[in-house]
Amino acid sequence: MLIKNSFEIPLPPQQAWAVLMDIPRIAPCMPGAELTGQTPDGGYLGKVSVKLGPVALSFNGVAHFIERDETAKVAKVKAQGSDQKGRGDAHAVIEFRLSASGQGSHVDISTDVTLSGLVAQYGRGAGLIQAVATQLVGQFAVNLSSMITQPSAQAGAERGVEPAKPISGFSLVLSAIWQNIRSLWSR
């Protein structure tokens, strides 16, 4: 399933590129995500937790850059994870494209994701998955912008990062449904 999203970063492209390539710095900005380590080959180990009503999914996974073109400002990441309770897997290739915009930089994200096992049952509705992904990217963009615009004294200070709380898929789904209804009325 192909999912497309975009967001703005309040930095010029060269600075925005450096921030986006700093995975340990930006990982806490993604709702429900936690960076847990690095692999010897430069990959990243992590955990993503999502709660869908009474069902809590927690994926342990690994992500690697498979392409980084600083000149073109394009990067690709291959990620894969498995639910801790054996209910399924997720595999994704995520492409980031960065370009200049009036507010700083525009980021286009294209994600090709495959879900398997029981987890795939939750992901049957492609429109709903797209809407939930849009909500997550929106929250990530707000968190990233907030991190970037912090006073430099705070940004430079070493501070402990609190482990990510599981994101509530239920509230994301409700929000996505509400956005779909609103878009129908605005036509």
Image (cartoon, rainbow, N blue to C red):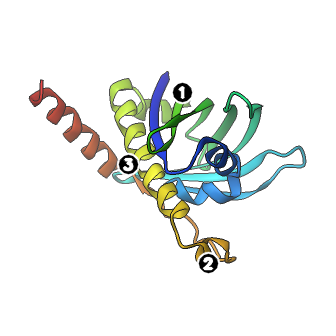
Q: Which residue is mark 2?
A: 153
Which amino acid does the dot numbered 3 rest on? Gly
Q: Secondary structure at mark 1?
A: strand
Q: CA distance from mark 2 to mark 1?
A: 34 Å
**From the viewer's perspective, is 155 left or right of 145?**
right
Q: Position of residue 114 (x, y in %)?
A: 56, 26
Q: CA distance from mark 2 to mark 3?
A: 35 Å
* Image: 182 above or below 31: above
* Image: 8 above or below 157: above
Is 31 or 103 nearer to us in this picture?
A: 103
Q: Is residue 146 visible?
A: yes
Q: Which residue is located at x 69 percent, y 32 percent?
A: 75
In the displayed image of the protein, which residue is found farthest to the front?
102
Is label 2 or label 3 in front?
Answer: 2
Among the 4 quarters of the image, the one containing residue 151: bottom right
User: What mark, if any, has residue 110 been given in the picture?
Assistant: 1
Among the 4 quarters of the image, the one containing residue 159: bottom right
Is label 2 or label 1 in front?
Answer: 2
Q: Secondary structure at mark 3?
A: helix
Q: Which residue is located at x 30 percent, y 43 percent?
A: 173
Crowdedness near tag 1: few (<14), some (14–19) or many (≥20) residues, C-alpha within 10 Å? some
Which amino acid does the dot numbered 1 rest on? Ser
Q: Position of residue 23 (x, y in %)?
A: 69, 51
Q: Which residue is mark 3?
A: 169
Q: CA distance from mark 1 to mark 3?
A: 21 Å
Which amino acid does the dot numbered 2 rest on? Ala
Is 117 or 76 nearer to us in this picture?
A: 76
Mark 1 or mark 3: which comes first in sequence?
A: 1
